[in-house]
Image: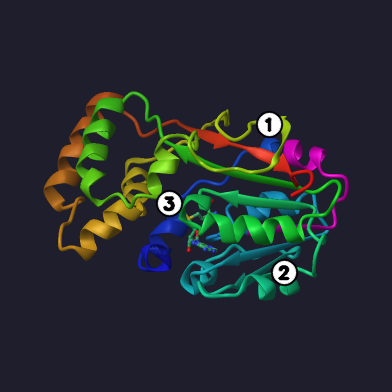
Amino acid sequence: MAGLFTKQAAVYAAARPAYPKDLFTKLAAFTAHHRLAWDVGTGNGQAAIGVAEHYDSVLATDVSAEQLLRAVPHPKVQYLHTPDATPGQDLVTTLGGEGSVDLITVAEAVHWFDLPAFYGVARRVLRRPGGVIAVWGYNYRLSPVEDMMARFFNTTLPYRDPPARYCTEGYRDLPFPFDDIGLGREGEPASLDMEHEMSFEGLIGMLRSWSAVTTAKQRGVDLLGERVVKELEEEWALGRGVAGAEGDLQGLPAGRHPQGR
Ligand SMILES: C[S@@+](CC[C@H](N)C(=O)[O-])C[C@H]1O[C@@H](n2cnc3c(N)ncnc32)[C@H](O)[C@@H]1O
């Protein structure tokens, strides 16, 4: 699956939003110490950079070397390629051993992971007590072009990889076996607003970075061919007159190491 983000890494880096600073301030307030954070599935560091404001250092890992090549440099962030088959024990060692991580963040990525394996490593490396794990994804509500977006979204449905459903459904079904800290929990994720101004070119870039659009292309179908882009542009102009859009961030379960597990 790393290939889904490898092929369009350049598009991804240009199109995807960073996260609200408040989110990282909120998460940092939950951890007892602020030495080491682990941002998993970091992509181009969209979350790692925000986390770095609150921790001495951040280890930011990804299975896609191409995504990491386009990562935003930061003095406190160390980017590290962790190929798909990296054994859990190697990850634990790389992260400094059992109980060494104060905060684990996974932004818009956990639905792609082998969850039992990842959660197993997370439990081992989280500091006890006081360590926190937070995972989140986002869906766009593009105002006022919701109809246009809904129609485009429908064209992507046949190419959606099953794990992506966790995200489109706001992580409501995502297994999350960690203790509740009051910021969303398994089955009841929290929802936060995330505003993001977007030009039409930005919108097209974002759509091109969708994994389903990449999957369709791999199967010989261009969901964003010239005609479709022209139609979208006409509707965008009708809807807005000017460039701009809003999005929202949903599905934030955050929790501590489960007691006794
Ligand atoms: C949708 S991107 C999210 C990137 C970034 N965190 C963000 O918020 O935009 C998903 C990322 O997860 C990575 N990924 C997928 N499976 C992974 C795994 N098992 N371990 C680490 N990274 C993984 C992909 O290569 C990709 O960069």
107 in relation to 76, above or below: above
Q: CA distance from mark 2 to mark 3?
A: 32 Å
Distance from disc 1 to disc 3, alpha carbons, whole Å, reads 28 Å
Residue 208 visible within the image: no
Badge 3 marks a residue whose secondary structure is: helix
Q: Earlier in the sequence, mark 1 or mark 3?
A: 3
Against 49, residue 83 (above or below) is below
Quickly name the residue at label 2. Answer: 92
Residue matched to label 3: 15
- Mark 3 close to ligand 1, CB under 8 Å: no
Residue 13's x, y, as percent?
47, 58
Q: Nearer the viewer, mark 2 or mark 3?
A: 2
Between 65 and 162, the one lying in front of the other is 162
Pointer 2 or 3: first along the chain: 3
Answer with left or right where residue 261 lies relative to residue 220. right
- Residue at 71%, 50% (x, y): give it: 51
Q: Which residues are magenta?
A: 25-39
- Name, please, the residue furthest toward the front: 260
| Residue with the mark numbered 1 | 183
Residue 148 falls left or right of residue 171: left
**Residue 206, placed above or below residue 218:** above
Quarter of the image for residue 81 reads: bottom right
At horizontal 19% and vertical 51% (from top left) the residue drawn is 223
Q: CA distance from mark 1 to mark 2?
A: 26 Å
Q: Position of residue 233 (x, y in %)?
A: 22, 38
